[in-house]
Amino acid sequence: MGVSVSMLASGSRGNCAIVASACTKILVDAGISGRETFKRMKSLGEDPHSLSAILITHEHCDHVYGLATLAKKLRIPVFMTVATQQAWARALRNENGVRPQLEKWERFESGHSFQVGDIAVKPFTIPHDAVDPVGFTFRAEGIKVGIATDLGYLPVSVRDHLRGCDVLVMESNHDVEMLRVGPYPWSVKQRVMSRVGHLSNEALANFFTNDYDNSATFVVLAHLSQENNHPEIARREAEKALAMRGGLFQNRVLLASQSEALTPICL
Ligand SMILES: [Zn+2]
Ligand SMILES: [Zn+2]
């Protein structure tokens, strides 16, 4: 049956994706409500109770909003780094300082591979203003999937991890000029543009032009800003850069959406 990637939601109002093999199904981030996650899975014909595990990239709300509910309802292992788990629990403590517990918390460390069923997961550090943020690559049945969103730039180490991916989910957060003249206060603009902020269309295009190995059958543009980007601008920038490398014929560019699940990518 191969490997599939389903983008359930992507953007600053919630991120959630599924990477699945024939016998393992991983939820990557839980940034929309439990109810909405269930709804979007069902819209794809997926049973939420068939999920094997939840993996969390970092503690920002748009990546963990539905985590407590989903962990409780599904009672499946939740993989988080120690620092991310602590930051998440600290943010959710009640007025008496009591922190929420995860029934099945599995710790991982950036740079150290681990296995979920038949999927090999490699977490790697990304530059972002969270306590211990990571991107992931997944390998199963000879297929490699890479997910890298929420990063201020693409360090060499991240570029290395993303080599040889058959499906590449990349942040294409903002158009620099739209952000510059857009409605955000200057402090927020600075945060987004910083080395620990979010990746622009231009920075991603630069990666495609200079450093990308043209390996992916599908390139998914993700975490698009609704205020400072436009899907067609992001697509145009990415396709232009891929075409310059002669890679557009190998790569199909898809856009992940905030409001609805994308048709699953199957390899
Ligand atoms: Zn985010
Ligand atoms: Zn973030």
Image (tube, rainbow, N blue to C red):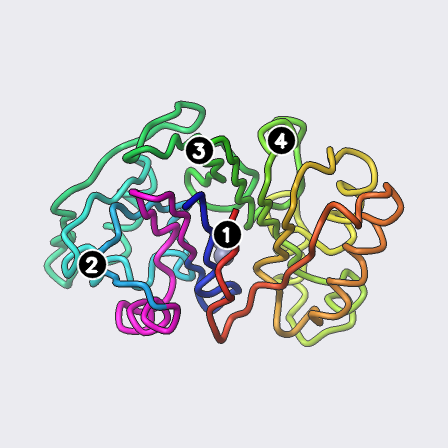
Amino acid marked by disc 2: His
Horizontally, residue 203 falls left or right of residue 244, namely left
Q: Which residue is mark 1?
A: 266
Q: Which residues are magenta?
A: 17-44
Question: In this orientation, which residue lies closer to the viewer: 184 or 174?
Answer: 174
Marks 2/3 in contact by CB < 8 Å: the verdict is no
Amino acid marked by disc 3: Glu
Residue 164: which disc? 4
Using the numbered discs, state the Cα–Cα distance from disc 3 to disc 1 in whole angstroms: 12 Å
Amino acid marked by disc 4: Gly
Using the numbered discs, state the Cα–Cα distance from disc 2 to disc 1 in whole angstroms: 21 Å
In the image, what residue occupies the spot 34% across and 58% down?
30
Residue 49: which disc? 2
In the image, what residue occupies the spot 68% across and 36% down?
215
How many neighbours does mark 4 have within 10 angstroms: few (below 14), some (14-19), or many (20 or more)? some
Secondary structure under badge 1?
Answer: strand
Q: Is residue 164 above or below residue 49?
A: above
Q: Name the quadrant containing residue 63.
A: bottom left
Marks 2/1 in contact by CB < 8 Å: the verdict is no
